[in-house]
Protein backbone atom coordinates (compact mmCIF):
# COMPACT_ATOMS: atom_id res chain seq x y z
CA UNK A 1 0.00 0.00 0.00
CA UNK A 2 1.32 3.40 -0.95
CA UNK A 3 1.52 6.18 1.57
CA UNK A 4 -0.41 9.35 0.71
CA UNK A 5 1.60 12.12 -0.84
CA UNK A 6 1.85 15.31 1.20
CA UNK A 7 -0.13 18.25 -0.15
CA UNK A 8 1.95 20.72 -2.11
CA UNK A 9 1.89 24.39 -1.25
CA UNK A 10 0.72 26.77 -3.97
CA UNK A 11 3.57 28.44 -5.82
CA UNK A 12 2.16 31.90 -5.09
CA UNK A 13 2.65 31.33 -1.36
CA UNK A 14 6.20 30.92 -0.22
CA UNK A 15 7.37 29.71 3.17
CA UNK A 16 8.56 33.24 3.98
CA UNK A 17 4.99 34.49 3.59
CA UNK A 18 3.74 32.60 6.61
CA UNK A 19 1.96 34.54 9.31
CA UNK A 20 2.55 34.16 13.03
CA UNK A 21 -0.38 31.74 13.36
CA UNK A 22 1.25 29.23 11.04
CA UNK A 23 -0.96 29.97 8.01
CA UNK A 24 -0.12 31.87 4.90
CA UNK A 25 -0.54 35.59 4.44
CA UNK A 26 -3.53 36.51 2.28
CA UNK A 27 -2.71 39.19 -0.31
CA UNK A 28 -4.46 42.52 0.23
CA UNK A 29 -6.23 42.32 -3.13
CA UNK A 30 -7.81 38.99 -2.16
CA UNK A 31 -8.91 40.38 1.21
CA UNK A 32 -10.43 43.47 -0.41
CA UNK A 33 -12.27 41.39 -2.99
CA UNK A 34 -13.67 39.11 -0.27
CA UNK A 35 -14.67 42.09 1.89
CA UNK A 36 -16.21 44.10 -0.97
CA UNK A 37 -19.76 42.81 -0.47
CA UNK A 38 -20.02 43.37 3.32
CA UNK A 39 -18.28 46.75 3.03
CA UNK A 40 -20.57 47.73 0.15
CA UNK A 41 -23.59 46.75 2.22
CA UNK A 42 -22.30 48.88 5.10
CA UNK A 43 -21.86 51.86 2.76
CA UNK A 44 -25.36 51.41 1.31
CA UNK A 45 -26.78 51.10 4.83
CA UNK A 46 -25.03 54.28 5.93
CA UNK A 47 -26.35 56.14 2.86
CA UNK A 48 -29.86 54.81 3.52
CA UNK A 49 -29.66 55.81 7.17
CA UNK A 50 -28.50 59.31 6.22
CA UNK A 51 -31.44 59.65 3.82
CA UNK A 52 -33.93 58.22 6.34
CA UNK A 53 -32.68 60.55 9.08
CA UNK A 54 -34.32 63.54 7.37
CA UNK A 55 -37.54 61.75 6.28
CA UNK A 56 -40.26 60.92 8.78
CA UNK A 57 -42.09 57.78 7.59
CA UNK A 58 -44.83 58.48 10.15
CA UNK A 59 -45.92 61.46 8.03
CA UNK A 60 -47.66 61.12 4.65
CA UNK A 61 -46.01 62.31 1.45
CA UNK A 62 -42.48 61.13 2.17
CA UNK A 63 -40.43 59.68 -0.67
CA UNK A 64 -39.92 56.25 0.92
CA UNK A 65 -40.56 52.64 -0.17
CA UNK A 66 -43.98 51.15 0.41
CA UNK A 67 -45.16 47.60 1.06
CA UNK A 68 -46.85 46.15 -2.03
CA UNK A 69 -48.53 43.42 0.08
CA UNK A 70 -50.13 46.06 2.31
CA UNK A 71 -51.21 48.12 -0.70
CA UNK A 72 -52.86 45.10 -2.34
CA UNK A 73 -54.46 43.42 0.67
CA UNK A 74 -54.58 45.96 3.51
CA UNK A 75 -52.80 43.39 5.71
CA UNK A 76 -49.38 43.92 7.23
CA UNK A 77 -46.57 41.58 6.21
CA UNK A 78 -43.78 40.53 8.64
CA UNK A 79 -41.60 43.42 7.48
CA UNK A 80 -44.23 46.17 7.58
CA UNK A 81 -43.09 48.94 9.90
CA UNK A 82 -39.41 48.23 9.31
CA UNK A 83 -38.74 51.66 7.82
CA UNK A 84 -40.59 53.38 10.67
CA UNK A 85 -38.67 51.18 13.15
CA UNK A 86 -35.34 52.16 11.59
CA UNK A 87 -36.30 55.85 11.71
CA UNK A 88 -37.26 55.56 15.37
CA UNK A 89 -34.01 53.74 16.21
CA UNK A 90 -31.99 56.41 14.40
CA UNK A 91 -33.70 59.00 16.57
CA UNK A 92 -33.29 56.98 19.79
CA UNK A 93 -36.96 56.15 20.37
CA UNK A 94 -36.88 52.48 21.38
CA UNK A 95 -40.52 52.37 22.52
CA UNK A 96 -41.77 53.63 19.15
CA UNK A 97 -39.46 51.18 17.35
CA UNK A 98 -40.96 48.35 19.43
CA UNK A 99 -44.46 49.49 18.48
CA UNK A 100 -43.59 49.64 14.76
CA UNK A 101 -42.19 46.09 14.45
CA UNK A 102 -41.29 44.16 17.59
CA UNK A 103 -40.08 40.98 15.86
CA UNK A 104 -37.69 42.84 13.55
CA UNK A 105 -36.36 44.75 16.54
CA UNK A 106 -35.76 41.48 18.42
CA UNK A 107 -34.02 40.01 15.36
CA UNK A 108 -31.55 42.91 15.01
CA UNK A 109 -28.87 41.48 17.35
CA UNK A 110 -28.83 38.18 15.41
CA UNK A 111 -28.66 40.04 12.10
CA UNK A 112 -25.82 42.20 13.44
CA UNK A 113 -23.91 39.11 14.61
CA UNK A 114 -24.31 37.48 11.19
CA UNK A 115 -23.15 40.66 9.45
CA UNK A 116 -20.11 41.04 11.69
CA UNK A 117 -19.13 37.40 11.09
CA UNK A 118 -19.46 37.96 7.33
CA UNK A 119 -17.34 41.13 7.56
CA UNK A 120 -14.68 39.44 9.72
CA UNK A 121 -14.33 36.57 7.26
CA UNK A 122 -14.27 38.98 4.33
CA UNK A 123 -11.52 41.10 5.87
CA UNK A 124 -9.54 37.89 6.45
CA UNK A 125 -9.85 37.05 2.75
CA UNK A 126 -12.33 34.19 3.17
CA UNK A 127 -15.84 33.82 1.82
CA UNK A 128 -18.58 32.91 4.29
CA UNK A 129 -22.20 31.88 3.97
CA UNK A 130 -24.45 31.08 6.89
CA UNK A 131 -26.08 27.65 6.82
CA UNK A 132 -29.65 27.72 8.08
CA UNK A 133 -30.74 24.15 7.38
CA UNK A 134 -34.27 22.75 7.32
CA UNK A 135 -35.05 23.36 10.97
CA UNK A 136 -33.73 26.91 10.87
CA UNK A 137 -35.70 27.69 7.72
CA UNK A 138 -38.85 26.22 9.26
CA UNK A 139 -38.30 28.27 12.43
CA UNK A 140 -37.83 31.54 10.52
CA UNK A 141 -40.86 30.90 8.31
CA UNK A 142 -42.93 29.82 11.32
CA UNK A 143 -42.09 32.99 13.25
CA UNK A 144 -42.88 35.11 10.17
CA UNK A 145 -46.28 33.46 9.70
CA UNK A 146 -47.16 33.71 13.41
CA UNK A 147 -46.07 37.35 13.52
CA UNK A 148 -48.13 38.17 10.43
CA UNK A 149 -51.24 36.55 11.89
CA UNK A 150 -50.73 38.08 15.33
CA UNK A 151 -50.12 41.64 14.16
CA UNK A 152 -53.12 41.60 11.83
CA UNK A 153 -55.49 40.28 14.52
CA UNK A 154 -54.41 42.73 17.24
Image (cartoon, rainbow, N blue to C red):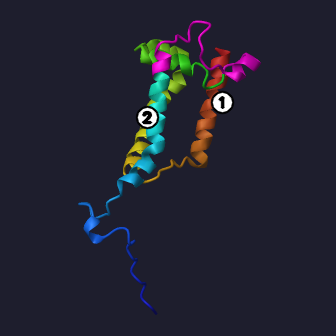
Q: Is 34 placed left or right of 137 in the picture?
A: left
- Magenta stretch in the rendered image: 50-76
What label does residue 145 carry, if any? Answer: 1
Q: Residue at x 44, y 91 (%)?
A: 2
Relative height, residue 115 to residue 146 (above, below): below
Residue 125 visible at all: no
- In the rendering, which numbered label is found on residue 18? none
What crowding class fits label 1: few (fewer than 14 Cα within 10 Å), some (14-19), or many (20 or more)?
few
Residue 54 x, y percent position in the rendering:
48, 12
Counting from the top left corner in percent of width and height, residue 57 is at 56, 12
Pick the front one: 3 or 59: 59
Q: State yes or no: residue 68 in magenta.
A: yes
Q: Is residue 71 left or right of residue 93?
A: right
Please tell me which of labels 1 and 2 falls first in the chain: 2
Query: Badge 2, how many Cα within 10 Å: few under 14, some, many 20+?
Result: few
- Residue occupying the point 37% across, 73% down: 9
Front position in the image: 75 or 149? 75
Alpha-carbon span between mark 1 and mark 2: 23 Å
Q: Residue at x 28, y 71 (%)?
A: 15
Residue 70 located left or right of residue 34: right
Q: Secondary structure at mark 1?
A: helix
- Give the residue number, with chain letter if any, for mark 2: 112
Quadrant including the C terminus: top right
Residue 124 shows in this picture: yes
Task: Please tell me which residue lies in front, 1 or 119.
Answer: 119
The percent position of residue 5, horizontal first and vertical second, equals 41, 84
Amino acid sequence: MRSPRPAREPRSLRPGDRTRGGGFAVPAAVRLRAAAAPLGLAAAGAAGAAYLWSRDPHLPGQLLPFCPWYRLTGLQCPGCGGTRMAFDLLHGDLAAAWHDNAVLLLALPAVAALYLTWLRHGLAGRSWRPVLGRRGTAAVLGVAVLWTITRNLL
